[in-house]
Image (cartoon, rainbow, N blue to C red):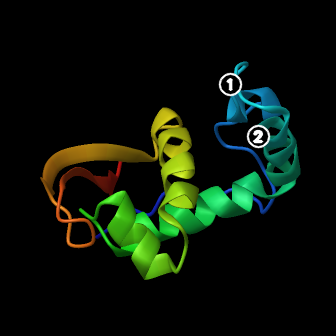
Amino acid sequence: MSHKAPQPPVGSLWAVPDATALSRRSDPATSKAAAVAVLPRIGDLQSKVLDAVQANPCRTRNELAAVMGWHPSEVSKRLPELERAGLVRRGPERVCNVTGRACAVWEAA
């Protein structure tokens, strides 16, 4: 019997307390503005990435992005948030089918 992680309500925040956690102090103003803009949707984005990891275990971020139809940077921003929340974990490295380079795989915690 598989155990699926509980899903948060749409728009809720799992691992990001506020927009400052989404950008660095040294980031340009445009990056900080983007962090503020994504904040209302962060729970939904995290949920979609978690669903992709659960449905496609042991995939790299680039492979997950390809499956989801997202840009890899969109996936790579959500994975550490989910990792900090204890919902996913970084697995061993292997050659990525998208980039041909060694990359860590991700799996549900």
Kindly indicate the quadrant of the structure image that contains residue 3. bottom left
Q: Position of residue 64 (x, y in %)?
A: 40, 69
Marked residue nearer the N-terminal end (2 or 1): 1
Residue 44: assigned label: none
| Above-or-below relation of 109 to 55 | above
Kindly indicate the quadrant of the structure image that contains residue 45. bottom right
Relative to 7, 9 lies left or right: right
At label 2, counting other C-alpha atoms closer than 10 Å, the crowd grade (few under 14, some 14-19, many 20 or more) is some
Amino acid on which the number 1 mark rests in the picture? Arg
Relative to 97, 29 lies left or right: right
Q: CA distance from mark 2 to mark 1?
A: 9 Å
Locate the N terminus by quadrant: bottom left
| Above-or-below relation of 70 to 17 | below
Residue 31: assigned label: 2
The residue sitting at 76% across, 40% down in the picture is 31
Amino acid on which the number 2 mark rests in the picture? Ser
In depth, the one of 23 and 19 nearer the eye is 23
Q: Is residue 61 visible?
A: yes
Residue 24: assigned label: 1
| Above-or-below relation of 66 to 25 | below
Dot 2 and dot 1 residues touching (CB under 8 Å): yes
Q: Position of residue 81 (x, y in %)?
A: 56, 40
Q: How many marks?
A: 2
Kindly indicate the quadrant of the structure image that contains residue 20. top right
Q: Position of residue 24 (x, y in %)?
A: 68, 25
Relative to 23, 11 lies left or right: right
The residue sitting at 50% across, 69% down in the picture is 51
Q: Position of residue 57 (x, y in %)?
A: 28, 66
Q: Is residue 54 visible?
A: no
Identify the element where label 1 is drawn: loop
